[in-house]
């Protein structure tokens, strides 16, 4: 999140490993196109795509253009040729095996040529849009070929998710990368941090005098963070069978939401200050036990009025799979601000709706004043930060219903992003790529954060690996998840908000 708009980033070459992949066509190239619209692309830029298949540069470029045109057409827009020209003015496809040295020799030659012809200042951004099994190999080969050594300009590396699949593998990957690059050259993406609503949590908390004084255990009863999806595995059965809901969503996306909500105020918007506060927060998380966590797997059911199959019937999923598609947990943060305030987290596939929110529940007002009235119980106040869809911030509080009697009703004030701001077309990667180009690492994860997050879920991963779930599948598609998730809150005398 660049603290101020800094205009066009420095001229550079962008090298995308995985040039023919989904991420490149669905997110990276459309994000570059959107950046061109706001003048936030480098004045001079060469885009080099590396992948296994045989393709000419023209075929690569035209394929990407066609895909972009089709996606724009879905929202009734046409491709703007002038903008596309800015992205595609210099596009080179390199066929190469990620594991062979020859690829890096050829790549080095291409980079040197482009740099010489266009005076790119020696700047190169490498984007690893590939399966995670290639991360360490590519970094090592780039390092051995001398391509990430910073002499004149910058050499940076963007690494996508998943960053490891447990604490040990994350540490191993970090040490592989850090053998060839310095920490400030590595940009570990968590695409949730590219969402405006997530970035706005810091503005809400720290740019207003109103919220921070009540943002603590004196006033807050508990916090509920929900990232619910109604989609299934979407043809990614192979990936999901190895991953599951916990690894896929919790140590990364959900924990980023926890960190934004729970971190202490940083002294500045400097990346290191902010990341240090997040890392500090993770250190305060109370070790999880299996009793704090619930897992679920969906059975068949009905989603958006259509019948859908059970997880075990999905493509590339084994018929007796024990992989979880839902997880809920109770997290405690042992520090002065949050001691005694549970953070309840849940995420899952094939739930009732696509709905992500952070809901902060305040403590109830004392009832005594209303004892002689019709009011039996006071509703608690809620502040709901709606991440997606229908991005908004909503405050629920009690108001007197008009009329002679003292009767209360819970009412709401709401700020909707779309009512206030004209939103520029975005795929959610624009800010992340721009920030990397200008060298602002605020929205990227540092090695210690990634390891701390895996450290928190490690006891659960180990515990689950040793005990098969007893009642899988345990929730129907299109519902709010397994009943055990409700029990988790009921034990504390609380209940989940409805997923809608
Ligand atoms: C990805 C997960 O990281 O995030 C997917 O691998 C999940 O399983 C996706 O569907 C959710 O992201 P978004 O931006 O669509 O909410």
Image (spheres, grey):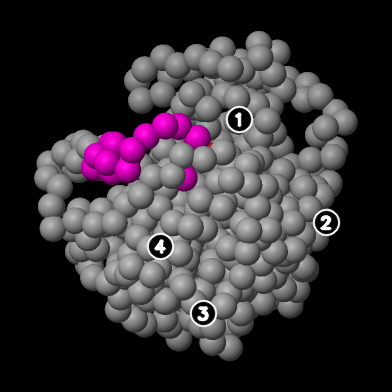
Q: Position of residue 199 (x, y in %)?
A: 44, 67
Separation of marks 3 and 4 at Cα, in angstroms: 15 Å
Asked whether residue 62 is drawn in magenta, I would say yes
Establish if 197 lies above or below 11: above
Neighbour class for label 4 at 10 Å: few (<14), some, many (≥20)?
few
Q: Which residue is mark 2?
A: 287
Q: Which of the two marks, 3 or 1, is nearer to us in this view?
A: 3
Q: Which residue is mark 4?
A: 113
Q: Which of the two marks, 3 or 4, is nearer to us in this view?
A: 4
Residue 215 located left or right of residue 277: left
* Magenta-drawn segment: 50-65
Q: Earlier in the sequence, mark 3 or mark 2?
A: 3
Q: Which mark is residue 165?
A: none
* Residue at the image position 51 percent from the left and 40 percent from the top: 96
Separation of marks 4 and 2 at Cα, in angstroms: 52 Å
Q: Which of the two marks, 1 or 4, is nearer to us in this view?
A: 4
Separation of marks 2 and 1 at Cα, in angstroms: 26 Å
* Residue at the image position 53 percent from the left and 27 percent from the top: 236
Asked whether residue 446 is drawn in magenta, I would say no
Q: Earlier in the sequence, mark 2 or mark 1?
A: 1
Labels 3 & 4 near each other (Cβ < 8 A): no
Q: Which residue is mark 1?
A: 240
Q: How many marks?
A: 4
Separation of marks 3 and 2 at Cα, in angstroms: 45 Å
Establish if 319 lies above or below 162: above
Q: Which residue is mark 3?
A: 152
Labels 1 & 4 near each other (Cβ < 8 A): no
Q: Quick one: SS at disc 4?
A: helix
Neighbour class for label 2 at 10 Å: few (<14), some, many (≥20)?
some
């Amino acid at each position: 999140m660049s603290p101020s708009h800094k205009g066009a980033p420095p001229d550079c070459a962008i090298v995308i490993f995985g040039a023919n992949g989904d991420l490149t066509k669905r997110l990276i190239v459309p994000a570059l196109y959107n950046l061109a619209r706001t003048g936030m692309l480098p004045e001079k830029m060469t885009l080099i795509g590396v992948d296994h298949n045989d393709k000419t540069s023209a075929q690569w470029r035209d394929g990407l253009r066609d895909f972009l045109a089709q996606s724009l057409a879905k929202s009734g827009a046409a491709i703007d040729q002038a903008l596309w020209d800015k992205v595609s003015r210099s596009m080179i496809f390199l066929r190469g095996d990620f594991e062979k040295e020859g690829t890096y020799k050829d790549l080095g030659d291409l980079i040197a040529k482009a740099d010489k012809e266009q005076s790119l200042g020696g700047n190169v951004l490498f984007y690893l849009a590939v399966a995670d099994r290639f991360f360490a190999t590519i970094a090592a080969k780039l390092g051995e070929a001398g391509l990430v050594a910073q002499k004149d300009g910058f050499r940076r590396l963007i690494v996508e998710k998943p960053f490891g699949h447990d604490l040990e593998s994350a540490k191993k990957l970090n040490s592989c990368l850090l053998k060839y690059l310095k920490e400030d050259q590595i940009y570990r993406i968590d695409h949730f941090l590219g969402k405006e609503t997530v970035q706005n949590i810091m503005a809400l908390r720290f740019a207003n005098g109103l919220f921070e004084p009540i943002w603590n255990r004196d006033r807050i009863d508990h916090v509920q963070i929900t990232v619910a999806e109604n989609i299934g595995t979407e043809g990614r059965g192979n990936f999901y069978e190895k991953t599951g809901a916990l690894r896929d969503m919790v140590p990364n996306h959900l924990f980023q939401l926890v960190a934004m909500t729970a971190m202490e105020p940083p002294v500045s918007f400097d990346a290191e200050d902010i990341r240090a506060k997040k890392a500090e927060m993770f250190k305060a998380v109370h070790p999880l036990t299996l009793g704090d966590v619930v897992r679920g797997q969906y059975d068949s059911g009905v989603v958006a009025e259509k019948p859908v199959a059970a997880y075990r019937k999905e493509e590339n999923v084994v018929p007796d799979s024990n992989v979880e598609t839902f997880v809920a947990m109770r997290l405690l943060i042992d520090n002065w601000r949050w001691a005694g305030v549970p953070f309840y987290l849940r995420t899952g596939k094939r739930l009732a709706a696509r709905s992500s929110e952070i809901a902060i529940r305040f403590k109830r007002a004392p009832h005594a004043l209303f004892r002689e009235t019709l009011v039996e119980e006071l509703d608690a106040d809620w502040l709901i930060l709606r991440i997606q869809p229908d991005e908004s911030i909503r405050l629920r509080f009690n108001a007197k219903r008009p009329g002679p009697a003292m009767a209360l009703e819970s009412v709401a004030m709401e700020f909707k992003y779309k009512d206030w701001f004209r939103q520029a077309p975005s795929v959610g990667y624009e800010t992340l790529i721009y920030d990397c180009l200008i060298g602002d690492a605020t929205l990227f994860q540092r090695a210690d954060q990634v390891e701390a997050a895996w450290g928190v879920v490690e006891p659960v991963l180990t515990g689950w690996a040793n005990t098969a779930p007893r009642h899988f599948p345990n929730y129907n598609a299109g519902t709010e998840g397994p009943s055990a998730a409700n029990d988790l809150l009921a034990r504390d005398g609380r209940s989940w908000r409805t997923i809608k």
